[in-house]
Amino acid sequence: MFTRKINDSLSVALVQPSVAKDYFAIVSKERDELSKFLPWPSKAHDEAFFENYIRQVLHDYADGKAMICAIVFDNKIVGSIGLNAINHDLKKANLGYWVSKHYRGKGIATLCTKEFIKICFDEIGLTKIEIKAAVNNVASRAVPERLGFSLEGIISQSENVNGQLYDHAIYGLIK
Ligand SMILES: CC(C)(COP(=O)(O)OP(=O)(O)OC[C@H]1O[C@@H](n2cnc3c(N)ncnc32)[C@H](O)[C@@H]1OP(=O)(O)O)[C@@H](O)C(=O)NCCC(=O)NCCS
């Protein structure tokens, strides 16, 4: 399992089965908050949910299809960031993230995204990264906007999050 140090207090580490209990501890306390923009916290009612998720994404990592990492800040797991749907034909992937509410506004998502840009472009051989966020998810949109992604368009009715239909802003960064 690899770890990438970003600075003295921040790193990203490929998920491993032991992370399930940390993810569950955060999500069980912050379920309502995280459910505003994410569809899965409302279904994550035990550690087994995350054990299954981690098993699946590690299979996908082995197949070159995904790379999901725990975000570690001051030696604590505080969130998750990762590539879904890595497409080697199109040389692109989608990047997603969430951070515990207690650790937001410190630049954690931005710094981790910056590290993922390096990994994608310099190590995995991708030439495009996409980030999609609900149009009203200001905090999430601020991350690609700060890092020089272009707004490529708005997809209407792109996701149903707990009964709420969201339009998505799609951001792209080309190498
Ligand atoms: C999106 C998310 C990962 C951002 O994490 P973070 O570590 O706080 O992000 P950063 O600190 O790197 O950047 C957040 C930026 O957005 C700004 N921001 C945060 N909340 C904001 C709000 N409600 N309105 C306006 N700006 C806001 C911050 O000021 C910061 O910008 P600044 O540094 O220029 O001031 C976090 O808010 C989160 O987990 N949200 C819930 C899950 C989610 O929505 N995931 C994304 C799904 S697409």
Image (tube, rainbow, N blue to C red):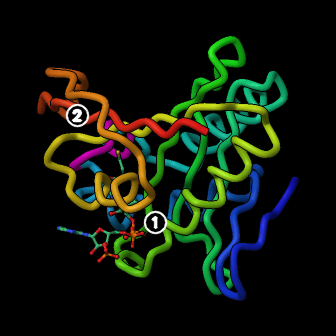
The residue drawn where x is 84% and y is 29% is 62
Q: What span is colored magenta in the figure?
A: 36-41
Amino acid type shown at disc 2: Val
Q: Which residue is mark 2?
A: 161
**39 within the magenta span:** yes
Locate residue 140 relative to residue 50 in the image: left or right: left
Instruction: Pinpoint residue 65: horizontal percent, then vertical percent.
Output: 70, 24
Residue tagged 1: 26
Q: Nearer the viewer, residue 122 or 158?
A: 122
In the rendered image, residue 171 lying in the magenta stretch gets the answer no
**Relative vertical location of residue 53 with respect to residue 77 in this rendering, above or below:** above
Crowding around mark 1 (Cα neighbors within 10 Å: few <14, some 14 to 19, many 20+) is some
Residue 32 position, x and y percent, is 23, 57
Percent across and percent down for residue 113 are: 55, 57
Of 36 and 130, which appears nearest the observer?
130
Q: Amino acid at mark 1?
A: Ile
